[in-house]
Image (spheres, rainbow, N blue to C red):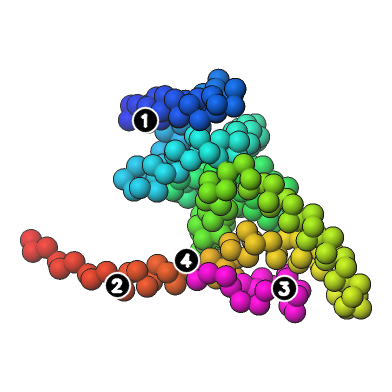
Amino acid sequence: MSRSAAVEAVATGLGGGVLGGAALAAFGLGWPGVAIGAANGALGGWRGTYAWRRPTGWLAFVLDSTWASPLTAAALLTHAVAAVQPGRGGYLADLSRRANRHVYRRGFRVRRGFLITIGNTVHGAGAIATTDARRRRVVTDHEDVHVWQGRWFGPSYPLLYGGWMLVGGACGAGVWLVRGRRAPLAKVVETCGYYLNPFEWWAYSRDANWPPRSKVADVGWRRPIVRPLSETSRRISRAVPARPATPR
């Protein structure tokens, strides 16, 4: 560990601990809050994940240490899972450093071929994430949306997400019956429970991937809910005038 990384780890660990303890003290969970905030801050500081030169970096750190601390606690458990894997889960520093997230090639995985986001961690990016532009965009334009959804919605995020999957999946079974079983039951249930989940609709739209290929074509929303991040970035870059070259 370099000296600068050590200093940042200590500083963010102390700051995260203070924020976490203060946020959860009102619920009688001051010391757990200290532990969560300190552990997340120390790890993030050691790896240099928070983008301190941007307001989003400070906001991400504060939310991870306070409002979203239950999700941060879950993320710390997934770090532990990755730590016991060969190569420590294949941590991808180039997709993590100053990006306000931790990305692993392997790490904590639930479904083969699918990435999963837990708190400020992204798992299952795969080895090609370092070279394949499309795979990298899934991390930067889709999974990163989930990271921020968890920060904005805090402890309500897994409840809302999981609640939709349960109710939506049950509704999918009803849709399958009403439509005369024209598509496989599992695919209709997956469409209603997963793809039509507003959090997924949001993330797939940002990834310029709505509707996804695996979604039943004529069930649910047909248009993206928001503009893709790639279009937003191009629009911003066109609006900002180029700086004149500095004479040498």
Q: Which of the marked residues, 3 or 2, is nearer the chain's N terminus?
A: 3
Q: Which of the marked residues, 3 or 4, is nearer the chain's N terminus?
A: 3
The label nearer to you, 2 versus 1, is 2
Residue 73 drawn at (x, y percent): 60, 33
Q: Return the residue at label 3.
A: 220
Q: Which of the marked residues, 4 or 1, is nearer the chain's N terminus?
A: 1
Q: CA distance from mark 3 to mark 2?
A: 35 Å
Q: Amino acid at mark 3?
A: Gly
Q: 220 above or below 87?
A: below
Q: Quadrant of residue 4?
A: top left
Over which residues does the magenta segment extend? 210-228
Q: Amino acid at mark 4?
A: Leu
Mark 2 element type: helix
Q: Amino acid at mark 2?
A: Ala
Q: Which of the marked residues, 2 or 4, is nearer the chain's N terminus?
A: 4
Instruction: Confirm whether the magenta stretch covers residue 226.
Output: yes
Instruction: Confirm whether the magenta stretch covers residue 238.
Output: no
The label nearer to you, 3 versus 1, is 3
Q: CA distance from mark 3 to mark 4?
A: 22 Å
Q: Return the residue at label 4.
A: 229
Mark 1 element type: helix
